[in-house]
Image (spheres, rainbow, N blue to C red):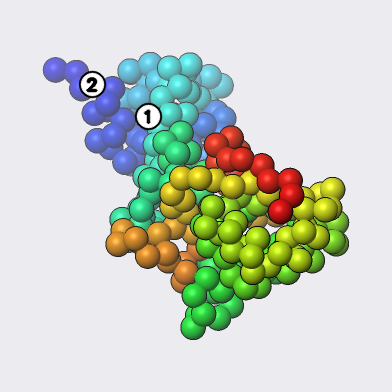
């Protein structure tokens, strides 16, 4: 009995890797062996099987993906990237609340595959900004931030960034806005008077914090028990991660009310 395509692809790591390798373009047997670090005896039987099932074609002593093979490989890559994204930080994802991430972006979590963790400037101080956050935001052209909390450094810090010509857009919760309006009124009045600033209020529960610029994305989440994890922010510098961060901001912006004056 002939194996299903699902079994054909996913029950063999070698066949899976051959398909993914050929997404780069047609290769000779030797090129496939070298790219995967497999021996000829390991690769050739898998290529034979894939060719018999019309996922590969041979031309000029090179093997390439058929249209069906290319479609399968493209979708495999997304699935593999998603699995690796979760697996690389599985303890983190399992111990944090993910409800704040809209489903369409959770489905694109593979775009954060090449990310690291950032550390706070002052681990003894709750919500202290992270080293990488402060360093990278200072050299950015714009910043779009989402925050369910406020640190005493934030109002002056973002005001200073805006005065230096950095475009600053912030989305905060109602309790945070009330604190900004009462405890940091002078800074917020100056902030809103500038042409390169925007402030929005999100009325619902906010289960994440985020900052995205043209240089980096920083993402913070709450633990499953409801406390915010101020020790570990996900940090990403890849273009796809930055797009993901901008789409996250746009999602919350669409459900927030803009504030133009205090």
Residue for point 24% across, 28% down? 7
Under tag 1, what secondary structure?
Answer: helix
Q: Is residue 196 above or below residue 181?
A: above
Camera-near label (1 vs 2) is 2
Quarter of the image for residue 218 reads bottom right
Query: How many labels sit on residues?
Result: 2
Q: Is residue 150 above or below residue 193?
A: below
Residue found at the far left of this picture: 1
Q: Is residue 125 above or below residue 113?
A: below
Q: Position of residue 149 (x, y in %)?
A: 53, 62
Mark yes or no: residue 25 visible. yes
Residue for point 66% across, 73% down? 153
Look at mark 2 in the image and give the residue it sits on: 4
Quarter of the image for residue 41 reads top left
> Crowdedness of circle 2 by 10 Å Cα count: few (<14), some, many (20+)?
few
Look at mark 1 in the image and give the residue it sits on: 47
Mark yes or no: residue 85 visible. no
Under tag 2, what secondary structure?
Answer: loop
Distance, label 1 to label 2, CA atoms, is 16 Å
Q: Position of residue 81 (x, y in %)?
A: 44, 43
Viewer-proximal residue among 83 and 243: 243
> Is 257 placed left or right of 127 in the picture?
right
Q: Quadrant of the N terminus?
A: top left
Q: Position of residue 116 (x, y in %)?
A: 52, 62
> Is 33 placed left or right of 160 in the picture?
left
Whether pointer 1 and pointer 2 mark residues with C-beta atoms closer than 8 Å, the reply is no
């Amino acid at each position: 009995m002939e194996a299903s395509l699902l079994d054909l692809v996913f029950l063999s790591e070698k066949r899976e890797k051959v398909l993914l390798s050929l997404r780069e373009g047609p290769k000779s047997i030797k090129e496939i062996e070298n790219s995967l670090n497999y021996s000829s005896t390991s690769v050739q039987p898998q290529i034979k099987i894939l060719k018999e099932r019309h996922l590969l074609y041979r031309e000029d002593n090179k093997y390439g993906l058929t249209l069906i093979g290319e479609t399968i490989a493209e979708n495999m890559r997304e699935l593999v990237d998603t699995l690796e994204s979760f697996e690389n930080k599985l303890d983190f994802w399992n111990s944090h609340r993910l409800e704040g991430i809209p489903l369409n972006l959770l489905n694109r979590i593979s775009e954060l595959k090449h990310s690291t963790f950032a550390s706070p400037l002052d681990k003894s101080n709750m919500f202290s900004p992270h080293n990488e956050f402060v360093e990278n935001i200072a050299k950015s052209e714009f910043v779009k931030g989402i925050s369910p909390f406020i640190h005493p450094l934030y109002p002056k810090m973002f005001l200073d960034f805006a005065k230096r010509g950095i475009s600053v857009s912030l989305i905060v919760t109602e309790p945070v806005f009330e604190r900004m309006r009462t405890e940091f009124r002078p800074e917020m009045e100056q902030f809103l008077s500038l042409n390169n600033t925007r402030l929005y209020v999100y009325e619902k529960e906010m289960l994440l914090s985020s900052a995205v610029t043209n240089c980096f994305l920083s993402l913070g989440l709450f633990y499953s028990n409801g406390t915010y994890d101020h020790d570990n922010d996900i940090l990403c510098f890849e273009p796809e991660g930055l797009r993901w961060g901008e789409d996250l901001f746009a999602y919350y912006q669409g459900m927030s009310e803009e504030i133009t004056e205090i």
